[in-house]
């Protein structure tokens, strides 16, 4: 960190639009949480980087799901670590054109330079799939949806599954606690769709 300061490199030199695209790409490739959307949008805002749900939708439309991880798959992150971890995944993504290799990192080197010594993709395993034959194709992990219940957008995690359709009366709540209270008060009927905003 001191070396970066001595070179005059600050957080905004590292936290660029391509760096956020890299972060989202890695998160989606391994089955990352919808919380990544909240956190990365907040970080981008603080860094002065223009990033919104439409941008995230474009990224998720390009990134295949490579990780076979719970809750939708069979492995956990310790299994990923055993075969090379996130550096191996990033090296695989970079080699297949999914990452911006020229992004500066906190090491003072670029992403591509950092990944030169990362482990190679191991062929004989089913924990992480190759982009040429992914666990699930692009747009089968995180989806950004818009509609009358979410005019500003919403985030849905498919986890490699096919998007099912369902229709029913929507019961909309502004927080999880209000939804729970309605359930406990037996105000929810079979076939109701629970929508919890702001969570």
Image (cartoon, rainbow, N blue to C red):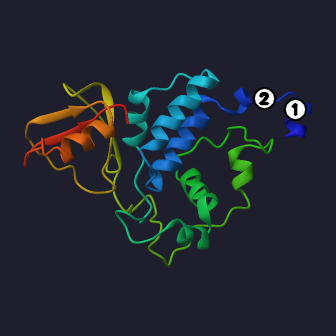
Identified at 53% across, 22% down, the residue is: 50
Q: Position of residue 51 (x, y in %)?
A: 50, 26
Q: In which quadrant of the rendered view does residue 156 lie?
A: top left
Marks 2 and 1, how far apart at CA: 7 Å
The residue at 14%/35% (across/down) is 170
Place of residue 149 in the rendered image (x, y in percent of width and height, measured from the top left): 21, 28
In which quadrant is the C terminus drawn?
top left
Q: Which mark is residue 5?
A: 1
Residue 123 image offset from top left, x and y in percent = 51, 74
Residue 182, label in figure: none
Farthest residue in the front direction?
185
The residue under label 2 is 10
Where is the N terminus found, in terms of image quarters? top right
- Residue at image position (46%, 53%) is 29
Are dots 2 and 1 in contact, CB under 8 Å?
A: yes
**Tag 1, which secondary structure?**
helix
Q: Secondary structure at mark 2?
A: loop
Query: Is residue 73 found left or right of 15 in the rendered image?
Result: left
């Amino acid at each position: 960190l001191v070396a970066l300061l001595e070179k005059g490199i600050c957080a905004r030199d590292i936290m660029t639009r391509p760096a956020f695209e890299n972060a989202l790409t890695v998160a989606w490739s391994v089955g990352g949480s919808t919380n990544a959307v909240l956190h990365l949008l907040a970080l981008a805002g603080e860094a002065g980087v223009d990033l919104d749900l439409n941008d995230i939708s474009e990224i998720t439309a390009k990134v295949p799901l490579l990780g076979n991880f719970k809750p939708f798959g069979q492995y956990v992150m310790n299994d990923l670590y055993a075969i090379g971890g996130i550096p191996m995944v990033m090296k695989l993504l970079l080699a297949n054109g999914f990452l911006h290799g020229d992004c500066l990192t906190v090491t003072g080197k670029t992403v591509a330079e950092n990944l030169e010594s990362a482990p190679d993709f191991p062929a004989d395993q089913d924990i992480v799939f190759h982009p040429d034959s992914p666990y699930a194709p692009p747009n089968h992990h995180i989806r950004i949806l818009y509609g009358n219940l979410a005019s500003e957008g919403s985030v849905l995690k498919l986890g490699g599954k096919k998007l099912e359709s369902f229709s029913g009366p929507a019961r909309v709540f502004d927080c999880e606690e209000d939804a729970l209270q309605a359930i406990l008060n037996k105000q929810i009927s079979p076939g109701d769709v629970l929508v919890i905003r702001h969570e």
